[in-house]
Amino acid sequence: MAPPAAGPVIVADDLAAAYGNRLIWQHANFTVDAGEFVAVLGPNGSGKSTLLRLLLGLLPPAAGSLQVLGKRPHRGNADIAYVPQRRNIDRDLPVRGRDFVHLGIDGSRWGVALGHAASNHRRVDEAIRSVEAQAYADRPIGHLSGGEQQRLLLAQALAGKPQMLLLDEPLASLDLRNQIVIAELVAELARANRLTVLLIAHDINPLLPIVDRVLYVAHGGVAIGKPAEVITTEQLSRLYDAPIEVLHDSHGHMFVVGLEAESAHHDG
Amino acid sequence: MVDSRLAITPYFGWDLVRVVQELFHYTFMQHAYEAGTIVAVSAGVIGYFVVLRSLSFAAHALSHIGFAGATGGVLLGGTTLALPGLLLFTMSAGAVMGALGQRLRGRDVTIGLVMAWSLGLGLLFTYLYQGAANLAIGILFGQIFGITSQDVTVTAVAAVATVILVLAVYRPLLFATLDEEVAEAKGVPVRGLSIAFMVILAVAVSEAVQVVGVLLIYALIVAPAAIAERFTTRPSRGVVVSAILAVLFTWAGLTVAYYLPYPVGFFITTIAFLSYILARLVAPTLALGRKRERESLAREEQALHSP
């Protein structure tokens, strides 16, 4: 594996995203550097997941250009790992967490596993250890708690030895303590493996200690910067084109007020 | 044929060599075991994925659609066109279902209506074909004791092809089944696999129709896999266990039917059903799961509260 290139690994130039004729957002200009941890924020339906789909090559840009790891996005890029929005894993699914992790290594190869068995098992063990999931990796995955499933899905993503990690709402449906635990785990793994991370979240607060920058997707546009630069009354009001207020509590937590009405308006 | 079996009193006892000699004495029994075994292996292997992909109702419907194809084939060109008709209908229906992919889920009403209509069509075709009552019974409930050596060859080729194809797509199929979104992002042709799988299933269903018939297909394709999934959480073992169970059910059904004057389809389905009940009693995965789930939550709580 080549070492991650220094400098930008994502370059968006006047990028636009659309489903058919429906424009999601446009005029997005930003870069993400190797090893950066970026939180992707914004109201429901604003096109956060769409951005990940563009990076994965599952959706072509509607306009502008996008470069990922020095190339145009294409499906099946082994250097990019993806953890989609938490799926409802069937409780009775008769498959171990370990088997899910294994798919991250050779799931897209044809045929049955014949060679590489031992080395692949080592890599699976390694990935499971790195998320501290040894205790329950051999249980049926549907029987595990949300936090445990999230760790194993993270292990699946890491097992493929990627350079970039795209996570869609990994903290959703976890309680606040678990949100912090998983967020810190992702940050730790990203540092250890020198990964660039884009993580979609609803709430910036559990991520404040670990993010480098935030990418805000709202009202058909995109803004990027340090949390303290982007999540401000002025910036968000301009982005949303509506009065938004950002409040701070004594711990430095940020609360965006006025979003709910906008998000309802936006989705409606 | 039934009469020839009843004409003598077949040996059954502790002398197993003699029992096996007895069972394989007649050509029709040899053919039944040969075809039954190959069909069971392919049904068991593909059945594992049918259950994992929640497609058991679709598999059931495919066989019914095949009934219209088989009877239509017979109506057009006699009994030699039964199998081509069966394959044509199941494979076309399979391709359509496969193209629908995830959207197939929750379409029980549509699938059920197509299934009922296919049975109705088959009824019309058998009515139009003179002297077709036996033909219809044969397709609906299987005719394993009427299988010719040529049928055995055709069935063997089809069954071996389905098993090889499933093994060829094993890993991406498992990936697409368990984790469709990630598989798609990783470059797995999810939609193509969905179509390929349903077409392979259509061939497997068409083979199985010869053994247990259109109506009893569940016993060979779904039951062994559903039982296997209660005993193993490893996909590779699940596939093997499912195939072994399907073979055992078939052998047991054929053997009992040789000695008793009742239809083999009854015995295979009964054995499958009783085994499933037994499996549920012996391996109550659900109850175990709930207990584990509580442990899991407790563990998480503990981890959070410890410094």
Image (tube, coloured by chain):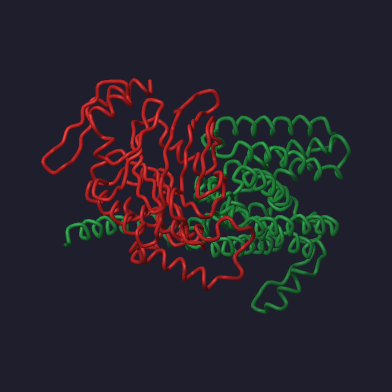
Chain colours: A red, B green
Q: Residue at x 30, y 24 (%)?
A: A238
Q: Residue at x 62, y 44 (%)?
A: B194
Q: Which quadrant of the rendered structure holds the C terminus of chain B? A: bottom left
Q: Quadrant of residue B239?
A: bottom right
| Residue B246 or residue B233, whichever sits in front | B233
| Residue B299 or residue B69, whichever sits in front | B299
- The answer to whether residue B285 is visible is no
**Does B107 sit above or below residue B203?**
above
Q: Which quadrant of the rendered structure holds the N terminus of chain B? A: bottom right
- The answer to whether residue B277 is visible is yes
Q: Would residue B89 be found to the left or right of residue B248 on screen? A: right
Q: Residue at x 32, y 24 (%)?
A: A240
Q: Would residue B221 be found to the left or right of residue B3 on screen? A: left
Q: Percent position (x, y) of residue B57?
A: 57, 41
Q: Residue at x 18, y 41 (%)?
A: A253
Q: Percent position (x, y) of residue A222?
A: 39, 32
**Residue at the left extreme?**
A250
**Does A117 sit above or below residue B272?**
below
Q: Would residue A105 be found to the left or right of residue B217 on screen? A: left
Number of labelled discs? 0
| Residue B252 or residue B298, whichever sits in front | B298
Q: Percent position (x, y) of residue B278?
A: 47, 60
Q: Would residue A232 be found to the left or right of residue B40 on screen? A: left
